[in-house]
Image: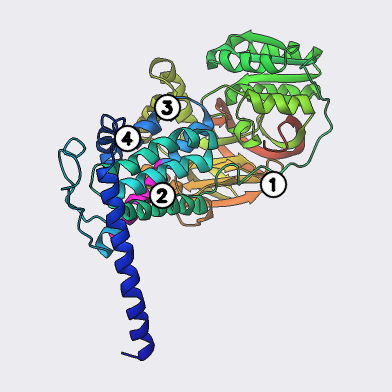
Amino acid sequence: MSPDVDLTARRIGPLRDRLLALDSRLFEFAANRNWPAAEPVLPRLSRSANHGVLWFGTAAAMAASRTPRARRAAARGLASLTLASLTINTLGKRSVRRTRPVLDPVPLVRQLKRQPITTSFPSGHSASAAAFATGVALESPAWGAVVAPIAWSVALSRVYTGVHFPSDVLAGAALGAGAAFAVRGLVPTRAQVVPPARPRAEVPALPDGEGLVMVANTASGTAERVRALHDGLPLAEIVECEPADVRAELEKAAARATVLGVCGGDGTVNAAAEIALRHGVPLAVLPGGTLNHFAYDLGVEGARDLTRAVQQGEAVRVDAGRFTSDGREGVFVNACSLGVYPELVRERERWSKRIGGWPAGVLGALRVLRADRHPLEAEFRGRARPLWLLFVGNGTYHRMGLTPGRRTDLADGQFDVRVVHGGRRPALRLLAAALAGPLTRSPAHAAVQVGRLHLSGVAPGTLLAYDGEVTDVEGEVTLEKLPEALTVYRPLSRN
């Protein structure tokens, strides 16, 4: 051993001993302290966090609030917890084999009925608590403020019940917070990926909403969101109607409105966009459906965002897509597709009123993929080929693997085309395409960006889905961009 290494070892040894001695004294101080208010709470809280049960329950409660930010925060919290748990169990516990504290100084009423058998360093409970709370806070500071006291209490409970030294808890919490930041590095939060505020459009500012006519589809459960909008824009005209009357009410609204508003799902927004384009009026979109892709990609998550944009006169111009086939035409602001997806949309609509949107989507996918069918035959990019799926997005979608896709630029002039080629086992091909994301080219699937697309040889009766609506096409199908054709209100800065 060299003299320098020996000198370093002699310095580290006493320092480590002093830190361990301090750790033990802090543990004994906590054990000897009287905590009457904690006795009925902390041991139960500590047990509830076993195997992440507390955090899964918290995430479910957050998701039940039905706000997009809460759902994203819950998902990010669970992803951070998963990474922290994997790190602790594969590296942390095996790297430092520290024995658990001696329970003699800990009052019996505090001790857990079932003592953990793993090594002490670092604290897995503290890592999970910090990872979940930090992940939630990175996505939603408001929800983070709600979760943080619970996470802090779980970490404290591990020392209080005598199963960890304070340094175990601190190290676990640091690892958990680090896991949350690592997840953010892989999957940025929505606040980090703000849609570009361009190209900006000149639109009227309506401080109290006068001139805005908002048509709300009552089938989408929009009442609460419309009330919140009316609180911020009291002079806005609100028209609530059944689905069958939506298009007629939108036509009447566009004829008298300074700004045409719509509240509903993507199909309702599609109808409003087509009418706004035809009448040349700006559009204000309030999300009110299940998916709300267009509104969320704009950065409008609720009444507060839209109210601020309308009051301040903030808007952008975005692209629209148009398809034509055998005299039929339509516009889309999200995507259109041929192949198995239009059939899935019809199955989902068939079951959604009975079992709900998400279960209907799962059931529809299972029924469509199990059915005995032949792939779509069409000439695509100069070659006739069988296709299980042709997806055409209005703008480039960004995603990783199976995580939901989103667009950060709604005026990029591009169609995002995803193709799953025909062949055996369509379910496996579709799953492989979903896992691979947009960057893969293979014999089974491919992704390209183009400004115009033409298909020929499409069989009569072929289904085309656009923004959740379904129609029949045949023969020649042309898809083209309408660059920056639609003016839409959206907040240009984040509060």
Q: What residue span does the magenta drawing correspond to?
A: 78-90
At numbered mark 4, what does the secondary structure look like: helix, strand or loop?
A: helix
Residue 293 in picture, x, y percent from top left: 58, 33
Q: Which residue is mark 2?
A: 432
Looking at marks 3 and 4 on the same chain, the residue that comes earlier in the sequence is marked by 4
For numbered disc 2, what is the local secondary structure? helix
Instruction: Tell me which amino acid carries mark 1.
Output: Gly
Considering only vertical position in the picture, is 319 above or below 192? above
Provide residue 222's location: percent of width, then percent of height: 57, 16
Three-letter code, disc 4 = Leu
Residue at the bottom extreme, as displayed: 2
Residues under numbered marks 1 and 4 in contact, where contact means CB atoms less than 8 Å apart: no
Q: Earlier in the sequence, mark 2 or mark 3?
A: 3
> On the picture, is 413 further left or further right than 390?
right
* Residue 91 showing in the rendered view: no
* Cα distance between the residues tagged 2 and 4: 34 Å
